[in-house]
Image (cartoon, grey):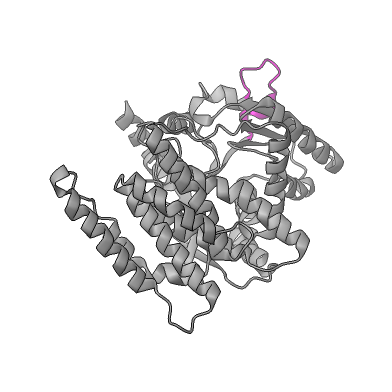
Amino acid sequence: MLQGVLSRAAAATDAMKAKRPASPAAGEEEEEGARARAKRLQALVSSPAEAEPAETRGLRLLTLLLRCAEAVAADHLSEARDLLPEIAELATPFGSCPERVAAYFGDALCARVLSSCLGAYAPLPPGRVRGALAASRDRAFQAYNALSPLVKFAHFTANQAILQALPPRGPLHVVDLDIMQGLQWPGLFHILASRRPRSVRVTGLGASLDALEPTGRRLADFAASLGLPFEFRPVEGKIGHVPDAATLLGRHQQRHNDDDDDETVVVHWMHHCLYDVTGSDAGAVRLLQRLRPRLVTIVEQDLGRGGDFLARFVEALHYYSALFDALGDGAAAEEEAERHAVERQLLGAEIRNIVAVGGPKRTGEVRVERWSDELRRAGFRPVSLAGSPAAQARLLLGMYPMKGYTLVEEDWCLRLGWKDLSLLTASAWEPDDDAAAAARHGSS
C-alpha cells in the first residue's frame, strides 16, 4: 500500500526538493511556504472517506514523515521535533508494512534531529561488533538469506560469472572485500569439486580477525569435506586502506607456490549501507587497477547516496518501503520473529545510517555514487551476465512464492526488483587493456 501512496505523493516531493531561501528576511515566507506545501501534500494523499483505518493510518504516517523530513532539510529542528511524538504514536516495528517502515524512519529522523541539535554526528560504524551483538547480526543475515532471494541472487549471479571466467582445473583465488560469514562460497565449492581445480584460495577482508578466523575455519572444514585443496587468508581492514596488491594476493609470503603465476584472481564486492566497507574510495580504485584481477563481480543497491537530504530521504523511503513490502505481512510466529530480526538488525540499521548520518561516511571526501560507472572509468569493461547467470537467477525467483519480484537484463547487468522498483544490480567486469592504459595515464 505504501508504495502506491508514495507514487501518488511524487509531485509533492518534487516540490519539496527545491532549496529554501537562506535569507533571514525570508523566514516568514519560508514558514508560509512550508505550511502550504504540507496542506497540498495532505490533500494529495488523503484517502476517501470509505478507506480502511489501516490505510488511513499509513497515509497519515507518510504525510508526517515527509513533513518532518522537510523540516529537517530546512533546519527547522523545533518543527521536526514536534512531529516526532505523533509518528512514534502511530508507528510500530510489529505492525503493518507502513507502520514498520515509519517506525524505523521515525527513529532515524529522531537521531538526525538530535545530532543536528548537538552539531555532531557519528560516522558509519566500522563493522566491528562483538559478543551478543555480533551473534544477533549473524543470525539476522542467515534469516534474511532464508526469507528473501536478494542475498541468494547476489551469490548465485557472482558465482556463475566466476565459473565462466575460470579455466578448467585452473587454480582460483577469490578476494572477497566484505566476506562476513562467507555464506556465498560453499555453493561455489560444490561446483568446483566436480572440476577438481589444483587449488582454491579465499582472501577475506573484514573488520576484525576475531570475526574472520571462524569464517575461515568453517570454509576450510567445508572444502575438506569435498576434497578441495583450500587456503584461507584473513585481512583485517578495508580495501581502500590496503597498502598494495601483494597484501591481498599473499605473494609477499615466502611460501608462495607455482600456482601463483597462473591462478585466476577474482574480486567480489557486495555493497550495502550497514557499515563502511571501502574506506577510501580513491584508494580502492587505485588498488583494483594494480591488482588487475581476471574478473570483478559487484552487487550494488539501487539507492542513490548523493544529493541533498530531502532527495536522499524520499528515495530511501521508496526503496525500503519496497523491501519491507517484499518481506510481507502476516506470517507464522517463527517467520514473524525472523522478519523482525532482519528489519531491526539490518534494514533498520541501514535506514538510520542513511537518514541520521547522512549517507555512508560523509567526511567531505567525494564518494563514488555507483561503482559500475567508476570501474568503467578505471579501465574495466563489462562482462555480460546473460546465459547461465541470468538463468540461475530466474530459477531462484521461481523458488519463492512471492510473485512481485522482477528480473531485468539491461546494459550487461542483471537487475532484481520488487514490482516496479529495482533493488539490486549485479554486474561483472574485466580489465580493458586500452582503457586501463588511458586511465593510468590520466591519473598520473
Magenta residues (range): 250-263
Residue 114 on image: x %, y %: 44, 39
Judge whether 377 appears above or below 123 on screen.
below
Judge whether 166 appears above or below 415 on screen.
above
Residue 351 or residue 163, whichever sits in front: 351
Location of the C terminus by quadrant is top left
Quadrant in which residue 5 is drawn: bottom left
The verdict on residue 253 being magenta is: yes
Residue 301 on image: x %, y %: 50, 52
- Residue at image location 40% in from the left, 39% down from the top: 379
Q: Is residue 303 left or right of residue 164?
A: left
Quadrant in which residue 146 is drawn: bottom right
- Residue at image location 49% in from the left, 80% down from the top: 51
Residue 20 or residue 417, whichever sits in front: 20
Q: Is residue 397 visible?
A: yes
Q: Is residue 273 left or right of residue 441?
A: right
Judge whether 265 appears above or below 397 on screen.
above
Residue furthest to the right: 225
Residue furthest to the bottom: 50
- Residue at image location 43% in from the left, 81% down from the top: 48
- Residue at image location 65% in from the left, 27% down from the top: 208
